[in-house]
Image (cartoon, rainbow, N blue to C red):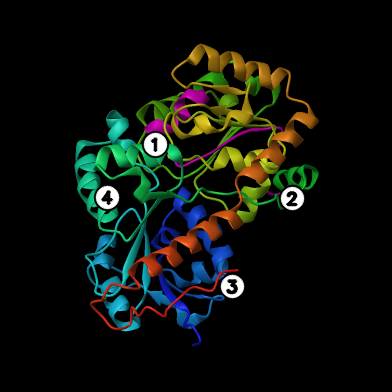
Amino acid sequence: MKTKPVKLFVDAHSFDAGFQGTQTFIRELYTQLLTYPGLDIYWGVQHTERLMELFPTVKQANILPYKKHRINMLRFIFDIPAYIKQYRFDFAHFQYLTPLPQRGCRYIVTTHDVLFNDFPTAFSSAYRVSRNILFARSIKGAAVKTTVSNYSKERIAHHYNIPQRQIKVIPNGVSKPVFSKTRARQLIKAKFGIENFVLFVSRVEPRKNHALLLNQYLKLQLYKNNIPLVFIGQQSIAVEALNRAIQNLSAEQASNFYWFRQVEQADLQAFYAACRLFVYPSAAEGFGIPPLEAAVCQVPVLCSSATAMGDFDFFAPYTFHPDNEADFEAKLKAVISNPPTESFLENISQVVLNRYQWQQSASLFNNLLADSLKSEATIPRLCGYGSPHLQLNTK
């Protein structure tokens, strides 16, 4: 009997917002999964043109537009349940949050982190309470429970009393650089007028430590050596210390400081490859993609060793704990004055490319779907379309 393709719905709402790690996860994971013949993938999104730019091979019929609600969460009440009933999806993939269960559709939940539990002072009490209720309900009720790192797996299991064996790690990956360093530097200088710069890519929240980096940059007076500082990322939570530091910049300091809330994907790739140094001072991450994306471009990376970033041991000795400001200052000064060798950078790039591959993550994800179908093959379904002969074609 010829097997039917598995119908998979993806909540791609993150593409309607500013840059965030979930965008990279969905974009790169599904770039690989779109090549799997056993998957028929549909997308829920408000700004359909944005999704078509990212996935030009996706058929228009497979893009399901969300209505423009005043409250984005209403898509879980109206749009998504209606699409699941209409298209009779076998699986629906969500980041963090799900709608109420729909008959015959297995939910896949990727909970990237629960950092608000381990770092409560970085989040409001309303945020923590609401997320704990919604995140716990969503992942506990999911047929397939996933996260992106062993660190997040352990913390999710701890906070929500879920056996670790039920949570599967689908790690983020990285792609080979698009631009050579020489070409990237030419492009960034021509388009933005910036060169020889220190770069930090992340949305702005207190835990990301933008203020720490800016203050150390000023303390070392790197601007006097014509070394600009570049931030790329939207401000999702106001950071008083950062805003105050920016307001107090002198004219000379301000002329060497750049904050781009958002850039095109091609420009972001060029920024990575063009920087003199990439710094990632975050105090808490469920994974931490940006330092890896910089590393594959063979540029120096100075990276926090906190939380999930403790797995990035290959960056040593260019690591620090963000609570130790003296160590951070010393290492920032050292890596600027005495950068690592090209052979060191080439080795790190290769290690990262070998360890974090989107192809491998897509294969793991596809296997989880197949395992879920097999485990339910002998269990009567509430709806007839979840039939036992529905299987995945693996690559």
User: Of marks 2 and 4, which one's residue comes earlier in the chain?
Assistant: 4
The amino acid sitting under disc 4 is Phe
- Looking at the picture, which amino acid does disc 3 mark? Pro
Name the mark nearer the viewer: 2 or 4.
Answer: 4
Q: Distance between the residues labelled 1 and 2?
A: 29 Å
* Residue 225 numbered mark, or none: none
Residue 207 among those drawn in magenta = yes
Location of mark 4 (residue): 135
The disc placed on residue 205 is 1
Residue 247 spot, x, y in % from top left: 44, 28
Tell me the magenta residue range. 190-214
Q: Which mark is residue 56?
A: 3
Give the x, y percent position of residue 375: 36, 66
Q: Which of marks 3 and 2 is nearer the N terminus?
A: 3
CB within 8 Å, label 1 to label 4: no
Dots 3, 1 in contact, CB < 8 A = no
